[in-house]
Amino acid sequence: MNNFNFCRPTDFYFGRGVENDAGEICKKHGAKKVLIHFGGGSAIKSGLLDKVEASLDKAGISHLRLGGVKPNPRAELVYEGIELCRKEGVDTVLAVGGGSVIDSSKAICNGVKYDGDFWDFHMGGVIPKDSLTLGCVLTIAAAGSEGSNSCVINKVIDGVVKKKGCNCQCNVPDFAIMDPELTTTLPPYQTACGACDIMCHVMERYFTNTKDVELTDGLCEGVLRTMVAMIPRVMSDPKDYEARANIMWASTMAHNNICGVDREQDWGSHRIEQELSAFYDCAHGAGLAVVMPAWMECVMEHDVMRFAQFANRVFGISVDFEHPQRTAKAGIAALRALWKSAGLPLNFEELGAKREDIPVLVDHLVKDDKTEGHFVIMDGPFITKVLEHAADYRD
Ligand code: NZQ
Ligand code: ZN
């Protein structure tokens, strides 16, 4: 087990109707003027924004709106949000939405307190030291941004879309309001993409070279088994509150790092996927459904017993000790079958990606960082192999 520091001070409010307490919760966190940041309109359509505003009014907190965050959030709106917060004297940003809205809010909160360009934080080297207060009203269980220290933003540089993350303590939200009922209005595809992202956040941690991490292995397996049980339930009955609730809390547990504090983590599949969602503007979870199993196939031999353990403890597949490769492969097949049943893409064609783009995708990836991943360190040719597996996979 590795040494670690774990500090996640987010104040969580979870359950039916908690969004109606948004005003009181903002007040508790010292808010005087709130920017409500949201996406393309789902929060207006569902009536959530009205509820949040009514709650802020009741608490006597002034507020203003900035909508229009797109999935794979863009830097342009972050700059607009920074200017607006400065002009209006905003002290708290309340993100009403999913990972894209929360990440756009994180970037605004950091940018307001910084004299330079917020993008410096995403190019590495500069770490945010201070930020506005950040709260979230979560509407999709997926990215885990409501409890994570990450923020991922898209910016066009020299005609190329760059999707870059920034990890730091300033990105950990001050509070998160999580009502699973808010996720019942999600289209099935978004529910499935979110579920896939949750599983991948755990798997990026689970496949590790660090030994003797039984406790966190068990936490990872618990989150993954929950997802295996809940995905079919929520896909067949989108209004299943208990399934929605389990998935929503799993999204936080999967990515607030409680499942990975003590170990070397991989993140190669996420880095590869970020190129896909930057290039094709596809949903992050959909890109992962294509990349992650392909990555698993390419690295399995590095520690086949860990893959057999995954198959056994997550999917209940008996370990074939004479041929652990067979167990490992059965685990990957079970994962793909689960995701397929949820309507996720499993290859390039289903994602809307093109095999002939692979050299450009790899070139973008290795231009800034020469290698990706930690479980197995991947150079350009290895990443090409993963993407070719992802492109060519057929049932
Ligand atoms: O924009 P609106 O109209 O709100 O529609 C959204 C959007 O189209 C819709 N939606 C959300 N809640 C809804 C709803 N539709 C109906 N009913 C609801 N209750 O869902 C669509 C997707 O929303 P988005 O916020 O993009 O989804 P997600 O939470 O999956 O976030 C994806 C982004 O997070 C990043 C991804 O790269 C991607 O940019 N990630 C952030 C991480 C982090 N900060 O820790 C970690 C992740 O690995 C990930 O990289
Ligand atoms: Zn993710």
Image: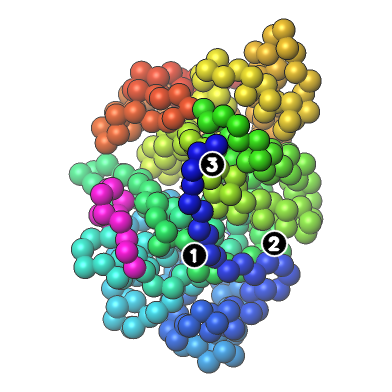
Dot 3, crowdedness within 10 Å: few (<14), some or many (≥20)?
A: many
Find out if the beta carbon at label 1 lies less than 8 Å from the nearest ligand 1 atom: no
The C terminus - image quarter: top right
Closest to the observer: 310 or 387?
Answer: 310
Query: Percent x, y for residue 18?
Result: 67, 73
Residues marked 2 and 3 touching at CB (< 8 Å): no
Q: What residue does disc 3 label? A: 262
Q: Which of the two discs, 1 and 2, labels the residue nearer the N terminus?
A: 1
Eyeballing the image, is 106 above or below 283?
below
Q: Which residue is mark 1?
A: 173
Query: Few, some or many C-alpha atoms within 10 Å of disc 1 (few <14, some 14-19, many ≥20)?
Result: many
Q: Which corner quadrant of the image does residue 380 belong to?
A: top left
Residue 328 appears in the rendering: yes
Q: CA distance from mark 1 to mark 3?
A: 22 Å
Secondary structure that dominates the magenta span: loop
Q: Residue furthest top?
A: 322
Name the mark nearer the viewer: 1 or 3. Answer: 3
In the image, which disc is placed on residue 180? 2
On the rendered structure, is 110 left or right of 231? Answer: left
Q: Nearer the viewer, residue 5 or 149?
A: 5
Dot 1 or dot 3, earlier in sequence: 1
Q: Amino acid at mark 1?
A: Pro
The magenta stretch is 119-130
Query: Relative to 364, does residue 299 appear above or below in the rendering?
Result: above
| Residue at the (72%, 67%) spot, across then down | 15
Name which residue type carries label 3: Asp
Q: Nearer the viewer, residue 203 or 228?
A: 203
The residue type indicated by label 2 comes to Pro
Q: Say which residue appears at 29% left-offset and 81% top-offset.
A: 87
Q: Secondary structure at mark 1?
A: loop
